[in-house]
């Protein structure tokens, strides 16, 4: 990869579009979905532009659990088709980008026979949906074996566990490599370029874009516009179609980071159940820290500035302490971040029950929206 060309050059080329000489495709949104679309489109020979209101991967795409995973969690929703799709895409990404999508062993501790049976059945289904092509088929571990892999567990309290395999990635780097590859193939990509108005058209669409660095404006013309703006998609749809009903129900997920000596962990991750709340948390070795997450709660605050609230933080701390008995306090937290999932609205109730499937929909003539989904399936989206 040669890296990105100058931002000024990209802006100049985008500003040079006209109704008579439009782009084939303008992508709005520089997260993993928009980056993947731009690369796919330019690789097919289309002329492509991409604009992002902030920095590339600055939204949900940099607030993930760092996993490219097969969707073991979706067994609870019995969404077997989504699990199969996730397993297929995970294995494809491992082949396409082995330097970015790497296997990781995950231990799932169990404390009673009922949980052993429940998780055992789930993991057989998980392997089957992956056509038994996971990195390795899961296996059962004795109590001492589980404790040896996850030193944070209290000695003698665990009946046993399961060992299964998933994949881990650097989410921001994955986005940037898609962006750079798209640029290398001729796509015009520009960050800090905010779309302030969208106008559809059967033949040509236009986007009024503000350069937020110097507050100048430009108009970009394209035969088709694809809105891949995540939780901001509803705002873009309002620009193109005033009065449009919201499609999204944002869900907040938080992650906490701890020092390795606060949560002792080797290179095996843990997938721990919170029996009281019937949820699961990932506990991952990440760089020189331990990353723990994620939550899944309804969110109605500012989508520009989600924060880690005290209730979120305490939920994760209580879950960790309940399984590991480490006596962790807020002072042990080395870092934290919050992100928003752009979930498609569904039935009333918990956001955890909403589907993680993506949706493609028409916003106006020539303007298409795509949202929902997850990082693992971005290429399929």
Image (spheres, rainbow, N blue to C red):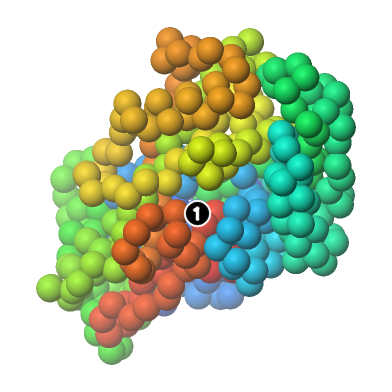
Can residue 318 be seen here?
Answer: yes
Determine the image quadrant of residue 116.
top right
Residue at position x 23%, y 49% from top?
300
State the residue in front, 375 or 108: 108
Residue at position x 65%, y 63% from top?
83
Can residue 102 be seen here?
Answer: no
Instruction: Please give the residue where the numbered disc 1 appears in the rendered image.
Output: 32
Residue 307 horizontal/vertical position (percent): 31, 33
State the residue in front, 5 or 301: 301
| In the displayed structure image, the side of residue 369 where residue 41 appears, left or right | right
| In the displayed structure image, the side of residue 193 where residue 360 appears, left or right | right
Residue occupying the far left of the picture = 243
Count the marks: how many?
1
State the residue in front, 352 or 198: 352
| In the displayed structure image, the side of residue 222 where residue 48 appears, left or right | right
Determine the image quadrant of residue 209.
bottom left
Residue at position x 35%, y 68% from top?
347
Secondary element type, mark 1 = helix
Residue 171 horizontal/vertical position (percent): 55, 43
Determine the image quadrant of residue 70.
bottom right
Residue 318 horizontal/vertical position (percent): 48, 25
Residue at position x 60%, y 39% from top?
273
Residue 358 horizontal/vertical position (percent): 47, 68
Residue occupying the far bottom of the picture = 202
State the residue in front, 30 or 349: 349
Crowding at dot 1, Cα within 10 Å, few <14 / some 14-19 / many 20+, comes out as many
Residue occupying the far front of the picture = 113
- Depicted 257 relative to depicted 138: above or below: above
């Amino acid at each position: 990869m040669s890296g990105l060309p100058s931002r000024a050059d990209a802006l100049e080329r985008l500003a040079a579009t006209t109704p008579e000489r439009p782009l084939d495709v303008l992508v709005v949104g520089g997260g993993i979905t928009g980056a993947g679309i731009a690369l796919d489109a330019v690789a097919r020979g289309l002329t492509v532009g991409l604009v992002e209101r902030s920095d590339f991967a600055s939204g949900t795409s940099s607030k993930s659990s760092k996993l490219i995973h097969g969707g073991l969690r979706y067994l609870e929703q019995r969404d077997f088709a989504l699990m199969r799709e996730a397993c297929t895409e995970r294995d494809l990404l491992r082949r396409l980008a082995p330097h970015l999508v790497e296997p990781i062993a995950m231990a799932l501790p169990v404390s009673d026979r009922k949980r052993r049976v429940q998780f055992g059945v789930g993991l057989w289904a998980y392997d089957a949906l992956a056509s038994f092509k996971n990195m390795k088929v899961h296996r059962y571990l004795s109590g001492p074996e589980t404790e040896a892999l996850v030193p944070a567990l209290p000695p003698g309290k665990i009946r046993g566990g399961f060992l299964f395999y998933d994949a881990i990635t650097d989410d921001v780097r994955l986005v940037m490599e898609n962006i750079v590859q798209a640029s290398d193939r001729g796509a015009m990509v520009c960050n800090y370029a905010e779309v302030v108005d969208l106008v559809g058209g059967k033949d040509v669409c236009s986007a009024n874009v503000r350069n937020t660095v110097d507050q100048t404006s430009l108009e970009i013309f394209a035969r088709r516009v694809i809105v891949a703006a995540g939780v901001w998609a509803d705002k873009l749809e309002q620009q193109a179609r005033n009065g449009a009903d919201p499609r999204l129900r944002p869900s907040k997920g938080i992650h906490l980071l701890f020092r390795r000596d606060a949560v002792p962990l080797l290179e095996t991750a843990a997938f721990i159940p919170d029996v009281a709340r019937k949820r699961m948390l990932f506990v991952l070795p990440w760089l020189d820290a331990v990353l723990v997450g994620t939550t899944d709660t309804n969110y109605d605050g500012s989508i520009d500035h989600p924060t880690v609230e005290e209730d979120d933080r305490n939920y994760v701390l209580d879950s960790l302490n309940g399984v590991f008995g480490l006596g962790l306090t807020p002072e042990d937290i080395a870092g934290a971040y919050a992100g928003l999932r752009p979930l498609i609205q569904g039935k009333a109730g918990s956001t955890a029950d909403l589907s993680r499937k993506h949706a493609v929909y028409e916003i106006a003539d020539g303007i298409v929206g795509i949202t929902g989904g997850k990082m693992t399936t971005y290429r399929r989206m």
